[in-house]
Image (cartoon, rainbow, N blue to C red):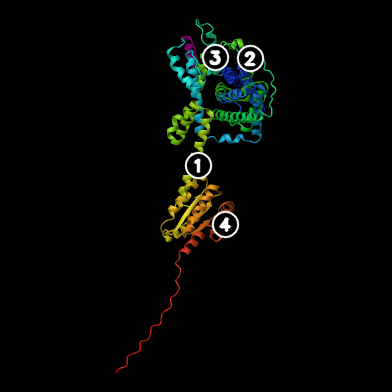
Amino acid sequence: MKFFDFSNLRGDILGGITAGVVALPLALAFGEASGAGPIAGLYGAIITGFFASLFGGTGAQVTGPTGPMVVVFAGLFASMSGSLELIFASVVLAGLIQIGFSFMKLGQYIKLVPYPVISGFMSGIGVIIILLQLSRLFGHAPDGGGTISALEAIPGAIADPNTYAFGLGALTLAMVFFWPKALSKFIPGALGALIIGTLLSLYLPTAVPILGDIPTGLPEFVIPKFSEDTLLIVVEAAFVLAILGAIDSLLTSLVADNVTRTRHDSNKELFGQGVGNAIAGLFGAIPGAGATMRTMVNIKSGGKTKISGMTHGLLLLSVVLALGPYAAHIPHAVLAGILVKVGYDIIDFQYLKRAHKGPRWDLILMILVLGLTVFADLITAVIVGVVLAALAFVKQMADEQMKDFEATKPQILNAAEKKILDAAQGKITYFNLSGPLSFGAAADLAHRARAKSKGDTSAIILDFVGVPHVDVSAAKAIESVISDAQYSGLDVYTVGMNKKVADTLKGLSGSALFKDKNNFDNRTKALEAAEKSLSPKKAPAKKKKAKAKVKPKKKK
């Protein structure tokens, strides 16, 4: 594979420029919120955006400061009393830990996130973007940075709009939604709307809210320092930042894959993120992660390869060094219109339209993750979604295993084996243990076996032919089944137990429960042995008592 792919150069440059313009106010805001200052936010976006794209494994990924990362960093900044050497030592160490994650190949586990969780996460991001921008469309801004503050600001913004700002916002929305496809080949709708909206704002009779002064200047090199007393807090903060950044970035990679129909390299992406954050810490910049919104802006504007993310970083650098006075005139309402379109595009309407035709639980899970993403935070939403999806899957597999387990005459039995079971008239109970027995199935295994073994049952057969392995929970459940049966005087026969399963069961339960003479290679032999055990044993012949001879009476 080529390190750089120039086949989509125009789209990558336009996508990177658009993403950079959108990232500009966010980087400034995140820097201010972190406590390190707006310039730290800008350089966080520049450094992590450039180096994470250069060395990362997701082509269209745009990296920069994100909400979850800034929240953790702000807490770190406050806990360390603004000591820059300690704070940025944690950032550098977090980057090195992420590089370590890449060499340990931990990135592959993030790929296990199911689609309803990704869909809910994506749609939640879209809703957040729209809510945060609605009041700005009317020339106002939320008092706080959260979703609740944005919701509370909307009624007041609608009741008292800035007419010119709203006009610019409405015009921007019209352009991004209805931009001619013929023109989009040369310039994306978002960039066209940005340029036209900004130029129009210069000639309005009344001022509208704009970005304002952009900080300029080169960053200073920060030498990370920590002492024996502060080592623990630095390492702890670094681990939190590293893990949070890894999850945040790889989830964004999954979202990018879903949109672009590509496949990212998780471990390579972790390496790129680690390099970006380690360098950012050395220059007093706040840490970053894969930014879903900016990544989607990049993709929708034509970006596909790492060149787009690098362009995004270079654009922000040029703004800091030279173009600050020009970028300062961009109206908030124009950016808001662009972002509303981005949010709309992110919402998974395609799945929502067809979700009622699929499993109801998947729809509930998607909506739950969406709600948590909007009203809690992204990481909580994904963790809850993955845990619930995993539990639902375990329950589903356990139910399927129990169906086979309770089947008295499953399809796998041949005619001769069914005949033996029929002739036994319920005195032989057959249990089919299918698939890798897990803790989900173990919960009901012993209980259902006891229920099925009541009545005239004299022997039970446990079929392990379809069981490649068992976990501890399943092993203890099988132990309960066998010990209960033996306690009740029932004969227990096992079929097709492989060495791995046998060693696990005997190791955890002891060899006394498992009699080798009762373990068979196939079902027919086990059924025949059980049938023989039912044959009535001949009672020992009783000795006949000799009849007492009665002497005839003598005649008188």
Q: At label 4, which amino acid type do we have?
A: Ser
Identify the image quadrant of the C terminus.
bottom left
In three-dimensional space, the C-alpha distance between marks 4 and 2, rounded to whole angstroms, equals 74 Å
Q: Does the magenta stretch mainly form a helix, a strand or a loop?
A: helix
Q: Find out whether residue 164 is within the magenta segment.
A: yes
Q: Which residues are magenta?
A: 163-174
Mark 2 = which residue? 320
Amino acid found under the numbered disc labelled 3: Leu
Residue 174 lies, in percent from the top left, at 48, 16
For marks 4 and 2 on the same chain, the one whose residue lies earlier in the sequence = 2
Q: CA distance from mark 4 to mark 3?
A: 76 Å
Instruction: Identify the mark nearer the N-term, 1 or 3.
Output: 3
Mark 2 in CB contact with mark 3 (< 8 angstroms):
no
Cβ–Cβ below 8 Å for labels 1 and 3?
no
Q: Circle 1 is placed at which residue position?
A: 394
Answer few, some or many: residues within 10 Å of disc 4's Cα (few below 14, many 20 plus, some between 14 and 19). few
The N terminus lies in which quarter of the figure? top right
Secondary structure under tag 3 reads: helix
Whether the residues at callouts 4 and 3 have beta carbons within 8 Å, the answer is no
Place of residue 320 in the rendered image (x, y in percent of width and height, measured from the top left): 63, 14
Q: Which residue is mark 4?
A: 511
Farthest residue, direction front? 229
The residue under label 1 is which amino acid type? Val
| Residue at the limit of the structure toward the top, as seen here | 205
Residue 330 occupies quadrant? top right
Identify the secondary structure beneath mark 2. helix
How much space separates mark 2 and mark 3, taking CA atoms?
A: 19 Å
**On residue 51, which mark appears?**
none
